[in-house]
Amino acid sequence: MSTGPITVGILGAGQLGRMLALAGYPLGLRFRFFDPNPESPARDLAPLTVASFDDSSALAAFAQSVDILTLEFENIPVIALEIVQKLRPLAPCPQALEISQDRLYEKNLCQALKIPTPANIAVETKEQLLQAVQEIGFPCVLKTRRLGYDGKGQKIIRAREQVDTAFQALAGSPLILEAFIPFTREVSQIIARNKQGEIAYYPLSQNVHRDGILWNTIAPAPDAAALIPQAQDYTTRIARKLQYTGVLAVEYFVHNGELIFNEMAPRVHNSGHWTIEGANCSQFENHVRAVCGLPLGNPNERGAARMFNILSTLPDTERMLAIPGAHVHLYGKAERPGRKLGHVTLCEQNAAQADELARQVESLLK
Ligand code: AMP
């Protein structure tokens, strides 16, 4: 397939879409975006259709204006995907989204694939919650099944007195109660799978969250040799079951040296931003390659990478750029508490050098 004339339509025009286009332009591809927000981070990169994901005629017109379709946001209504899929090839498939939109469906899939998850029970009423708390024990985590992200829509319950407050905070939507996993660390496995079923496995990333939001990624994850076969195996099971095309990210807790599934994202992932400078072929380029039916690129690392999210407020960009090897990415968003405004990546010859520069980056982000 020639890459020249292909136009890729991306549903969602956030920073992930922006980085997909930035990775796809060198391949001669063209892009178009669809997003309800006219101020979306990808707005300056390609034509943007501003319309709601409920607007079926806008969705149809958008699909007809492109050659193939993908997405950068997992909470697109499945019905919107079904509309566009009738008109143009879409990857990943609506089923992958449907499952990843609901924490209960994700866990049911894992159970069917024999992938360990935290013990969990779906709950809707207070009585069901009290019963579930008895079965799971303390501490436990109450989460909304749908539309939770960056730690939003979840409450840790450590004692009986906290049950009512947690329920009141989240009641009104279907919920899931999970056992709290006293993990030693969190890791994510990102893969790219093409239509032929070939898979490129990125090195395992180690992730540190603050208030439920990703703060820092270390890649490759240190001392992770024993975890890699399990991470690749579990993630492959999910991708094969869903006949997945594109980049898939799965987050795991590490507990007693074993992986426990936390959640999956049917898209490029924040814990893979380091791959832009830190891997031979980034997650963004490999996603574009996969959905366009092109051969996958080499996912291996080029060095020891560290990625820091720029959250809430922007740092002094000039001072950040003065740090040797600091790659600064800004998404063109206004400052707001908890918002992801950009990220900074380092990729050094060894971990000691990366850690030394990481201290300098961190000092500008505090
Ligand atoms: P999530 O949105 O489910 O990825 O949750 C955000 C963060 O909250 C995770 O990355 C963990 O740090 C923490 N967390 C979520 N669920 C659990 C759990 N069952 N046990 C321990 N920590 C959790």
Image: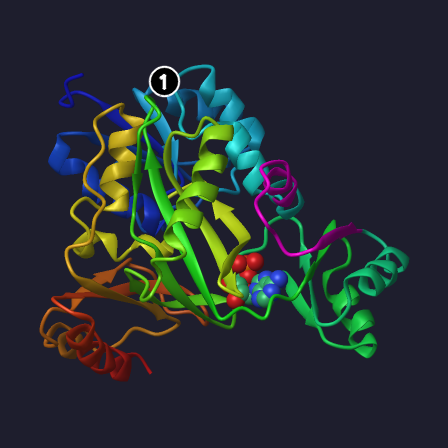
Look at the picture and state if 133 lies above or below 107: below
- Ligand 1: quadrant of the figure: bottom right
Q: Looking at the image, which is closer to me, 4 or 355?
A: 355
**At which x and y percent is residue 67?**
30, 19
Q: Is residue 308 visible?
A: yes
Residue 357, quarter of the rendered image? bottom left
The magenta segment: 107-123
Q: Determine which quarter of the picture holds residue 340.
A: bottom left
The residue under the point 71% across, 54% down is 120
Q: How many neighbours does mark 1 have within 10 angstroms: few (below 14), some (14-19), or many (20 or more)?
A: some
Residue closer to the observer: 52 or 273: 273
| Residue positioned most to the right | 127
- Residue 122 falls inside the magenta stretch: yes
Quadrant in which residue 334 is drawn: bottom left
Q: Nearer the viewer, residue 150 or 61?
A: 150
Quarter of the image with the N terminus is top left
Q: Is residue 264 magenta?
A: no
At x 53%, y 66%, the residue is 256
Which amino acid, mark 1?
A: Gln
Q: Report which residue position mark 1 lands on.
A: 64
Residue placed most toward the observer, 337 or 306? 306
Above or below, 300 relative to 27: below
Q: Is residue 251 above or below residue 46?
A: below
Residue 198 lies, with reference to residue 40, above or below; the image says above
List the single residue furthest toward the front: 226
- Position of the C terminus, as image quadrant, is bottom left
What residue sits 25% from the left and 61% below the top?
330
The spot of residue 77 in percent (x, y) is 56, 35
Side (left or right) of 123 relative to 186: right
